[in-house]
Image (cartoon, rainbow, N blue to C red):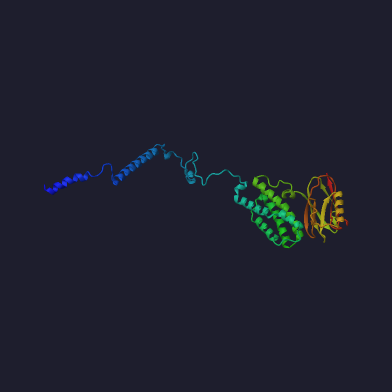
Amino acid sequence: MTRSDQAQLEREPEEVGSRQPGRTPMRGVWNWFGAVFGIVVLLGGGILYFLGRSGPEIDEAEVEQPVTAEEAEAQPAGPPATVAPAHEATDDISEESPVAIPGQTSAVLLGMYVVDSFGFPGLEEAYAEATEVGDRDAGQVANVLAAVDAVDWPDELSDFAATFRGDVAGLHEAMEAGDLEGARHGLEAVHGSQHDLSSGVYAWLAGTPVGGHDDGVQARQSMEVIEIEMTEFAYGPESIDIEAGVPVILRFTNAGMLEHEAMVGDAHMQDEWAAASANEGGHDPNDGHHGDLMAVTVLPGETADLEVHIDEPGTWYMACHLTGHYEQGQVATINVTS
């Protein structure tokens, strides 16, 4: 062994021992961390595996599988098979229920929303003091007509809708012609038929009988109609008979050249109206004096209905209290019998 080899052997132990005890290289740290992580993953996977196996085993053959309608028909006679439904089951719905035809129900509700939003009662009050037909009123009424025509009304409401539609059409025609008096009468008619239609719709939606109210279309159709002609200055016939407590419709047709009215009341009421008209020098039939009285005004060549309901037997009258008409004998007798 040479001297240089001996020197090399003497240096190596010193170099190896020169590393300080307690200090771990970084590579060793990462190796330690990876080993711990792997152990955790293995333990977690094992736990999940045993948890999954701990549940009850389900034999798919024991589960009743739904079959199609075709497969059910092909099966031999025996207990009925479970047929897969085409859609989620719902509660039974009666064919008479409006819910069974949701499209029609929505159309009816939308139509009534347009009608009720128009504000016919407010327009009627405005026209009582108006001096001319509004420029845009006819166009707005036409929109209501369009809304009514767009609805496929159910059979229970068809009569109500037809009556209301006819009244609105008459109102629209009067407004188009600039006929202020015709518009006033039209608004009065629309007011009543709108109430009937609205009440019918709510009854239909609730599933209750439609048309049970006294002033409904069906009730009016069952009333007796008495035809009366207006001329200068008389009614024909000069006397009519009605039954106490039974409403009737007096249908006035103005065959004269002048405007006429019919105000129904007993003798005392007629005298008061005549005195008031004389003191005021006559009255304008459009001044709103009728109020809730049984009264109607009819233009030449037109026809109007007046519902009359008198509860007590006795003698009543119909008379025209326009300037000079009553004084010239335009009065007729209403015999109310028990």
Q: In which quarter of the image is residue 326?
A: bottom right
Going 31% across and 43% down the picture, which residue do you hit?
Answer: 32
Q: What is the quadrant of residue 41 in the picture?
A: top left
Q: Which residue is nearer to you in this view: 49 or 95? A: 49
Q: Which residue is drawn at 69% across and 55% down?
A: 165
Q: How many labels does the image show?
A: 0
* Left or right: residue 274 compared with residue 75: right
- Place of residue 22 in the rendered image (x, y in percent of width and height, measured from the top left): 28, 41
Residue placed furthest toward the left: 1
Q: Which of 132 and 100 is in front in this view?
A: 132
Give percent across and percent down for residue 15. Answer: 21, 46
Percent position of residue 286, x then y: 79, 57
266 vs 249, nearest the viewer: 266
Residue at 35% x, 41% y: name it: 40
Q: Which residue is drawn at 67% across and 50% down?
A: 157
Quadrant (top left, top right, bottom left, bottom right) of the C terminus:
top right
Residue 139 percent location from the top left of the image: 68, 61
- Answer left or right for 169 relative to 81: right
